[in-house]
Amino acid sequence: MAINKECDFIMAEEYFDQTCPVCGSKNFIFDRNKRELICTSCGYVIAVMDIETGPEWRSFEGDEVDKSRVGLPPSYLLQDKGLSTIISSGDEDSMGRKIDVKRKRDFNRLRKWQQRISAYSSVERNLQNAITYLNQLGDKLNVPRPILEHAAYLYRKALKMDLVRGRAINSIVAAALYIALRHYGAPRTIKSVARAAGVDKKELGRCYRLLVRELRIKMPVIDPNQYIRRIVSSANLDSRVILEAENIIKMAKEKKITAGKDPVGLAAAAVYFAATKLGYKITQRDIALAADITEVTVRNRCKSLAEELGLEEPPRSSERRSRRILQRNK
């Protein structure tokens, strides 16, 4: 099933591998108001969810008593989606009274067996380790919770389709997170994700292509403008460079020369031309370090933009030195 931000992942999980009986499409959307799973191609109602997630009480003005008797909503970042009961580690009962030593020993034994039973099978232990690692990776990259939820959903689908067997858990988790970042319009370079996850870049690329192919995920095209602000911030440049670089990318799109090019390289080349146009003394190596790519990539993208858009590339340091020597000799 195609994933979008309006879809209720928890309710529609069992329908992700089904097709519409009318048009054969797999693009579904969940209407939260009518509790219906609808095909976006023909409008056919695939299923109606009978579970009401709204409050079961009425609230009146001036009534400050919390009548909620429910817990947290289901979450893919929890192994059991948060639907189980957890024995707390405190030494007090519900009335605030201290628990005696004998009962405390019994509760510790129950708590230990509950933890063992929660990850009884190998699949449950795999999922538990993957979610723990996903949360750690999200903290390293400062990823918002909705993106982590989407990554956990993709990993569960991969685990259900037996795509994790024979592969490292951290590689599949990093690939799922990379897909979720791109889906939500907050892309990171695959190199930065691989470095944070501690996996090889080529291995991460293989797992990424595996998930996209087997889960039939349609990846959005990355806009080079999404990388400009990060590169400008890393290079300690002014905000004026952002506007000038976005204008260069706009010109490149009008000329239709951005297709098939690395968006990070295009953004780095646009920032380089914008910075030199505004009078900044910066080299291609500085931009490459800020963008976390090679200097060769920046040089090639600068050359192509200069040829297609007629931009004047500033002379390199060696060329400047030779020009100064010629001026002295004259």
Image (tube, rainbow, N blue to C red):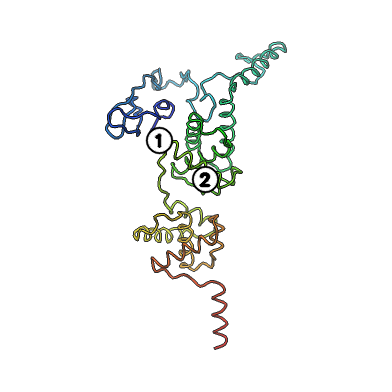
Q: What residue is drawn where x is 59% and y is 31%?
A: 129
Q: What residue is drawn where x is 57% and y is 33%?
A: 130
Residue type, label 1: Ile
The location of residue 111, given as percent across then percent down, is 64, 18
Residue type, label 2: Gly
Q: Is residue 217 above or below residue 245?
A: above
The location of residue 84, given as percent across then percent down, is 54, 19
The location of residue 198, given as percent across then percent down, is 61, 43
Residue 205's tag is 2
Decide which of tag 1 and tag 2 comes sooner along the chain: 1
In terms of secondary structure, where does tag 1 sit?
loop
Query: For this rendering, which residue is in front, 230 or 27?
Result: 27
Q: Which quadrant would residue 244 be assigned to in this image?
A: bottom left
Residue 111's tag is none
Q: Residues within 10 Å of mark 1 (few under 14, many from 20)?
A: some
Q: Which residue is mark 1?
A: 3
Query: For this rendering, which residue is in front, 224 or 199?
Result: 199
Q: What residue is drawn where x is 47% and y is 58%?
A: 239
Q: Which quadrant would residue 253 be assigned to in this image?
A: bottom left
Q: Is residue 167 above or below residue 234?
A: above
Query: For this rendering, which residue is in front, 15 or 85?
Result: 15
The reply, left or right, for residue 40 in relation to residue 290 is: left
The location of residue 306, given as percent across then percent down, is 43, 67
Q: Specify the quadrant that holds the C terminus.
A: bottom right
**How many numbered marks are there?**
2
Residue at the outermost front position: 166
**CA distance for labels 1 and 2:** 21 Å
Comparing labels 1 and 2, the label whose residue is closer to the camera: 2
Q: Specify the quadrant that holds the N terminus.
A: top left
